[in-house]
Amino acid sequence: MNPALPGFHPDPSIVRVDGTYYLVTSTFEYLPGLPVHRSTDLVSWELIGHVAVRPEQLGLDDVPTPGGTWAPTIRHRDGTFFVVVTVMLGGRGCVVFSATDPAGPWSDGVPVPAVEGIDPDLAWDDDGTALITFAGFPHPIRQVPVDLSTGQALGPVREIWAGTGAFAPEGPHLYRRGGHWYLLVAEGGTDRGHRVSIARGPSPSGPWAAAPGNPVLTAVGTEHAVQNTGHADLVDTPDGGTAMVLLGVRPLGFANAFSPLGRETFLVPVTWVDGWPQASLPEATGTPDEDVAGGDDWIAVRRTPSSLLGGDGLVLTGEGTTLADRRPVFVGRPQRHLGCTVDVVVDASAGRGGLAARHDEQHWFGLEATTDGDRTVVTARAVLAGLESTWTAAFPAGPVQLRIEQQLPPGGFVPAAVGGGVVRMLAAWADADPVLLAEFDGRYWSYEVAKSFTGRVWGLFAVDGTVSFTDLRYRGSDSA
């Protein structure tokens, strides 16, 4: 299945231990952070835990969007798993976490002050010295030997490679293979110019000779269904082969321009020719249709979902904040399908809240219910670059059903096929037919417009008072 991890799962890193694969991805401002997925066949993946389940492990309180956890690397040595990551734009900087069980618990983390950059990789030299390789500012790839127990540098930071000449060499991963060291990097920025390049040399610090066939993989200039392909990591397979995980987006419409889900994790096989890896673009086979009641595996913005959910079932207590605030009372899940419908019954008799889809503080849409005398008032809100549009409908007092439909654009050469699919927001009371409050083009709430580095996360929120949610249902499909 491709994507291997659908929805908001960027910057994948992978390791194989005793025949089992473990994969981590970026989470930016969300907690719990750095999900760990497990697979035995590189096809079916199971979420087994998160590296960061305690807010103090990352320190996201004052980190602005799009800061937070950028591009982790997972590795294993002598019975211990390690994840190294940079908390950008504040927080704890570069941190190394460790665990004997990848499901957790993970350590509180050891900061590495010498790493002033992004996308840290972890490898060990032939003498056992731990090496962190990262993208600096400006972008040349840099490296520093580190004591993982203290986080202290064991030598100077050195620049080791400037890439092939493309924009923004980043996301480095270092490997020992046969008599060579290989340095895999991302280049071209994480948009349509994204690509995977590689070099090799006699030591972990080079000197590096770029592969004659670079880039190893890119969708640049193609009409391929998966775009922005890059930020890859390699892993050996039991049959002696190699697999590559990488990020990509699935843009919609005949213009191939707008991707609502953000950057997802894909997986492709790798062949080696004359000592260099070669890979083809991933085919977008899609995610199986899903029709599920309820919700679990919640994530929240800069704090844990468990700190927000109270009582039995789904109950949220507002703090006077909205989704435009840095710390909203919001619990969500990454949208897994290009088209989906989410329904929930909201009891707002003692508060104000509802159902929403979030990209960041300035790009979100949702339905908000509140009680006004003998009425339940539902307001649909669509916020684009901080500009808000609203639509309102009133119902008899009592619980109200809220629904958000995110439809795929039609096929063919028609104006509606240019955009990102239609978003419809509806509300209903009791057994009455739903009332359509708003309908608009979803292209403006896509990765390409919001540029929040994450993707569409649907969920539940509270603004004031106590809001209860029941009968939550998610239906998703990648086909019209």
Image (spheres, rainbow, N blue to C red):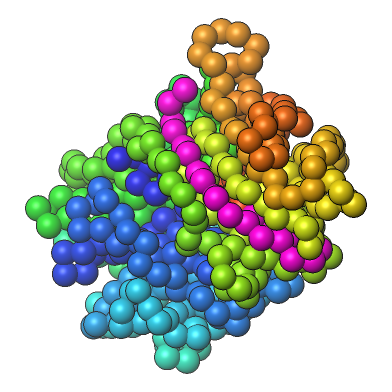
Instruction: Give the overall secondary structure of the magenta segment.
Output: strand
The magenta stretch is: 460-480
Whether residue 81 is visible, yes or no, is yes
Q: Going by the picture, which residue comes out furthest to the bottom? A: 150
Please say whether residue 46 is one of the residues in the magenta stretch. no
Give the residue at x 30% y 34%.
280
Mark count: 0
Where does the image place residue 27, in percent across and percent down from the top left?
Answer: 54, 61
> Would residue 440 be seen by someone viewing this image from the given angle?
no
Tell me which residue sits at (67%, 48%) in the image.
355
Where residue 376 appears, as percent x and y from the top left, is 81, 47
Would residue 23 be found to the left or right of residue 360 on screen?
A: left
Quarter assignment of residue 60: bottom right
Question: Going by the image, does 364 lie left or right of 154?
Answer: right
* Residue 335, x across and y down, in percent: 52, 45
Left or right: 415 in relation to 373: left
Image quarter for residue 18?
bottom left
Given residues 431 and 190, the one toward you in this image is 431
User: Along the line of sight, which residue is nearer the eye, 161 or 346?
Assistant: 346
Magenta includes 472?
yes
Q: Is residue 432 above or below residue 139?
A: above
Looking at the image, the residue that sits furthest to the left is 239
- Relative to the observer, which residue lies in front, 370 or 94? 370
Q: Residue at x 30, y 68 (%)?
A: 203
User: Quick check: 353 above or below 148?
Assistant: above
Which residue is situated farthest in the right direction here? 373
Position of the N terminus, as image quadrant, is top left
Residue drawn where x is 43% and y is 26% of the image: 479
Q: Is residue 167 left or right of residue 389?
A: left
Whether residue 105 is situated above or below residue 283 in the rendered picture: below
Q: How far across and down, in percent of the image, does residue 393 sit?
A: 82, 36
